Amino acid sequence: MTALVFAGVRKTFGSTIALESLDLQLAPGEFVSLLGPSGCGKTTALRVAAGFEKPDLGAVSVNDRDITHLPAHKRNMGMVFQSYSLFPNLTVHDNVEFGMRTRKVESAERKRRANEVLELVQLGPLADRFPHQLSGGQQQRVALARALAVRPEVLLLDEPLSALDAKVRGSLRDEIRRLQLSLGITTLFVTHDQEEALAISDRVGVMSNGRLEQLGSPRDVYRQPSSAFVARFVGSMNELPATVSDTHTAVVSGVTIPIAANPGAAGVANGAAVRLLIRPEDMHLDAGTADAGTAEHRHLPVLPGTIVLNSFQGATTVVSVQLDGMETPVAVHTSGSESTGLSGDRVAVRIDATRMVIEPV
Amino acid sequence: MVPLLAFLGLFLIVPAISVFQRALIANDGSFGFGALGKAFSGQNFDAFVFSVRLSVQAALVGVLVGTLLAYAATTITRPKWIRSLVTSFSGVAANLGGIPLAFAFVALLGRQGLLTKIMSAAGFELYGGSFTLDSTWGLTTVYSYFNIPLMVLVTLPAIDGLRVSWREACANLGGTSWTYWRRIGIPVLLPSLLGGFLLLFANSFSAYATAAAISQKSLIVPLRIGFYLRGDISANEDQLGFSLAAWMILIMTVSMGCYWMLRKRAERWQQ
Amino acid sequence: MAAMTGQPLPRLGRLGRVGPASLTLLCALFFVLPLLAMARFSFQNVPMIRLGRSTLLENWSASSSLDAFGEAEFRRSLGLSVRLALGTVALTLSLLLPTTLWVHLRLPKARAFVEFLTLLPYVIPSIALVAGILPLKPHARWFLNSNYSLIPFYAVLALPFTYRSLDAGIKALDVKTLVDASRSLGAGWGTTLRRVIIPNVRTSIISASFLTAAVVLGEYTMARVLLKQTLPAFMEQYQDREPQGGMGLALSSMLLTTLLFALLGVLTRPRRRTRTPRLEIS
């Protein structure tokens, strides 16, 4: 059984295509994030699921029931909005009870469930406050409680952390995931923050221009991006300008690198200019010192360069290296416990070519 | 701040004090609330009743139509210029008043009015019953010309403050449109609506020029004050005139005080 | 992007559109018809009794209105009203601009109090205010005899509108930062006011000025009781003598006010460039 299914969902607004043809299935209890820049269609997909937008084509079903034409107020979904969704004239308690009142749950049971769910988000003592007396993080926790109080089949979260302070964001993010795991509720989470999506999802769907570019576990999406877009959007990437010499190799700064198996290699012709995208942690510094990592990297292609600056960040050091013959310096991650050279030192940068993504220019 | 306080003190507070002074201290120097009491009786009492009835009526009409119009302006998204047209026109019309407005309605709904004639041609005699332009309903119609726009101006921000997410959250939690308005929309708007009512009430109660140009009869309190001041009623009764003015100030203080409190309440939710 | 859907009226259908549209149309009619009636009365010399489909196009002329404009008394009262408007605008701005600035910069807690102060003119409406002025006449005869004595009282009447306008404009700027930046670059208070603050609250100043002008040009109550011959006072008297001409004047007055505000709307339309405040002190 599938908990939530989008089948060929298409939605346009005038001449803009918000969703081309979305196919997505969530298993029961799964936490799936839709990740992408603004305008990619992730919010539209969520709103179609909630019933606030009607798809032009395609169907949405919950637990194998087709709900495509069901009005929003008849769907049994819990939704948390980005901000300001608590009813300002009702107390926290009344807000949480709201969904139960519309479903005509009787008073004693309502109270019990409201208290229960407020305890879940640890806001029991604030039940009699009004929304304007709460902080942003507290408001979102109440919104979460309110959505969960009706025991929905699916939980929909529309960038619930975007409007919050960085500090609150981190703790609330984990709280949402903990809650979701303990309740086992199928969840669709929309965000533009890739760190968020990677941290708490079972699967991540990266979207762009109405299309689902890649759907996979956080690790897969990060380590094996299927396209340059996904590679850039998730995590950070270095760019190395190169030319394709024949269909299996690219030449960068005089060094030839095989690219047959890399994502993005299929479409490029001989002689084409490309960018090789590679993660900072897939590049390694070889300064000739007896570093533990150097031995296993000796077989990797090497590009010479000069250290521009070191940025010590605790667990890692980000070394900015000006590679010979290139305009922009690249960032290389090394362990924070290792010592790196000084600005101006010559280094050799080894590239793990199997982890590159090819991007046409 | 001092210049502002001094300015207000001199040009607003001092005259206000002199009103109370002349209301409470008779020509022979004796102090007493007698004049205030007398100002509330006889023809003057009738004027108070008339004024209050008129102001309440005008305020109710203004609140009802004004709110609906403001809501209409926010919901009509095509064509896009409707909303700014309504806003700018409201800005204009809220300040149109006084003499020209009175003339306009005499031309429209007076005994020789254009609309009167049209209605008569269609079979409806406007002046067949007890209607006159200076009755409460007549004046209500005239006052609506500036009351409705004023209400639109005051209410638009409040309606804008009704967030889309509340509407959607309500639907998501199982509520219909009716549920939304009943449990969230109207309660949140209520302070603004009540505040608007008080503002329109105060506005209508204190209006002088329009009524003066429409009617020679001193039916409303401001007109009677005017008559007393000009010595039209009786040369020695001007203490009554000041008492009427004093009463007026008191009524306005209460109305604006309540309005102020409601405004503060509404702002709290508009965050 | 999700906001592209506009206002979500999920299940409103056609009825939901008809309602607001017809209401707006009805209101539009309500506001335009009186003007039409005025126009017909002032420009058509046909008494209502004789007005019918056949006589609809007879006897239209602007002569009575033109006569009214020609009256010397009209020109005098118009002149007085205009001068009063200018004076009131000047007084209001020179009083309120520094005060509002000061409150924003130095006394933020006093803002609520000042807002309260600006509601006071509502509490003491013009008829009561003028009633209070009369007993003071003997004490300030030299002042109250002048026509221009109306100016400070008109400034009081316009206070709620003008303060709100200026306050909104100043609130939209981060005045404190602007002033600090300006002074750290070496500008004194005068320069700061002239070259930094005023250009950036230009919209509010224009708005406040137009509102004040509208109030002054239409004010009748105080002028009447204090026996000053302003434009509205003249209009009312003239109407008794020459109904058509008087109506023509009233119509022009309403159209003029409408034009004033239309102009105001044009001048204060948000510009296409971003509204970041400009700091130019060279």
Image (spheres, rainbow, N blue to C red):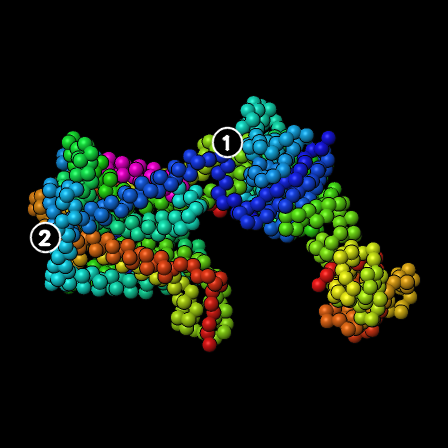
Viewed as shown, does residue C118 lie left or right of A319?
left
| Chain for disc number 1 | B
Give the crowd class for mark 1: few <14, some 14-19, many >=20 residues within 10 Å: many
Mark drawn on residue B176: 1
Residue A349 vs residue A55, the one in the foreground? A55
Residue C253 vs residue A142, the one in the foreground? C253
Q: Which residue is mark 2?
A: C242
Residue A264: % across, % down: 76, 56
**Type of the residue with mark 1:** Thr
Magenta-highlighted residues: B52-71
Residue C208 vs residue A54, the one in the foreground? A54
State the count of labels: 2
Residue A138: % across, % down: 60, 42
Q: Quadrant of residue A112?
A: top right
Q: Quadrant of residue A104?
A: top right
Q: Quadrant of residue A117?
A: top right
Could one spot residue A213 in this view of the protein?
Answer: yes
Q: Main secondary structure of the magenta part?
A: helix
**Magenta span includes B57:** yes
Residue at x-position 59% and y-position 48%: A17
Quadrant location, the N terminus of chain A = top right
Whether residue A303 is situated above or below residue A358 in the rendered picture: below
Whether residue C69 is situated above or below residue C282 in the rendered picture: above
